[in-house]
Structures are given as C-alpha cells and as structure tokens.
Image (spheres, rainbow, N blue to C red):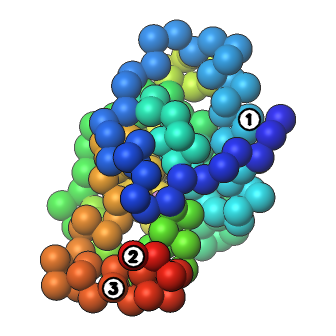
Amino acid sequence: MAVLEVETLGAKVLREKASPVDTVSDEIRALIRDMFETMYDAEGIGLAAPQVGISQRILVVDVADESEERHVHALVNPVIVESSRETGTETEGCLSIPGLEETVTRPLQVAVEALSPDGEPVRIEADGLLARALQHEVDHLDGVLFIDRLSSLKRGILLRKWRKSTGRS
Ligand code: NI
C-alpha cells in the first residue's frame, strides 16, 4: 500500500475524460487500496483515479451520513443512471484544489451503477452527502471539477484568490 501524490489544479490529467476499466484485475484492486490510503491520508471523503494521475474510471468514497452511518464504496466504471429533480446547495471542496471551498447545487438523490472491486455489478441509491460525493467524483472521471459548476464570475474571483494564496500564477 502506498500514499500516492494528489494532482492539483493545472494538471492535464484532471481535465481528461478517463477511460473505462476493461477488467477489474489485481492491479486495479491494488490501485483502489492505494486510493483509499491516499484519501484517508489527505483526510478526504472521496477520491477519483485521475486525482492520482491515473486516467481510468475508478472512484472511492467514505462518507458518514446524518445518522453517522458510514458508506464506504469503491466503484469501477460508475454511471449515474438516475438523478432527482430536487436539488440542494452545500459547500464542497476538493483535494485537487486545496483550501478552496464553495457552495455547489446538485441533485439531492442519485442512483449509480458500477462494478465492485470484485467485478460484480452494483447499484447504489444515494442521498445526502453520499449522493453529493458520488456526483463530485464521477465528475472527476469526465474531467470536470466542482468549480466548473459555479458561475464564471464566481469561479474567476475564487481562482484569483486561490492562486494568490497558494502563490501560483
Ligand atoms: Ni474533487
């Protein structure tokens, strides 16, 4: 197991559409273990493979809901197959844009179909923070970051501040 380096805003891999996984191999399972370790090390609640430089459709989440029940999932080739019409607005952050947080509006409930680390089909009906985390991570697999879901005005202001505070140009 290893803590992997987390790619940050500006890395090309974060903007690529990730490829589907052909076979859920031992190599993929090892990557999933490393992704969990990396996520926990960074104190995140979700991580997508492109964030560790691997352009494949894999995500991990570990989210506690309001009743403190933990939802731990590793999903291969996840697809959002249903989204509720009702939306909610909550604060999000991203390990790839450390220190930047902003409220994002997303559907409150989603259903996701994917393969488990054993290569078995799974379906997850999610609401609350889990639904939000899954949408955020699936976005990463399409090269989309949460800041893309803000107005361009808001995004511009936030990014200017972020670049200043992190000393990036
Ligand atoms: Ni993220």
Residue at the spot of label 2? 169
**Residue at figure coordinates x 34%, y 80% from the top left:** 159
Q: Is mark 2 within 8 Å of ligand 1?
A: no
The amino acid type, in three-letter code, at marker 2 is Ser
Percent across and percent down for residue 88 are: 31, 74
Q: CA distance from mark 3 to mark 2?
A: 9 Å
Q: In 3D space, how far apart are the residues under numbered discs 1 and 2 (Cα atoms)?
A: 34 Å
Q: Position of residue 8 (x, y in %)?
A: 50, 59
Q: Amino acid at mark 1?
A: Arg
Instruction: Work out whether 73 lies above or below 107.
Output: above
Whichever of callouts 3 and 2 sits on the residue coming sooner in the sequence is: 3
Nearest the eye: 72 or 29: 29
Furthest residue to the right? 1
The CB of the residue at mark 1 lies under 8 Å from ligand 1: no
Q: Which tag is nearer the camera, tag 1 or tag 3?
A: 3
Where disc 2 sits, the SS reads loop
Left or right: where 152 falls relative to 52: left
95 and 169: which one is in front? 169
Label 3 Cα neighbours within 10 Å, binned few <14 / some 14-19 / many ≥20: few
- Count neighbours of disc 2 (C-alpha within 10 A) and say few if under 14, some if 14 to 19, many if 20 or more: few
In the picture, measured across the screen, residue 112 lies left or right of residue 58, that is: left
Frontmost of labels 3 and 2 is 2
Q: Which residue is mark 3?
A: 160
Q: The C terminus is located in which quarter?
A: bottom left
Mark 3 and mark 1 in contact (Cβ < 8 Å)?
no
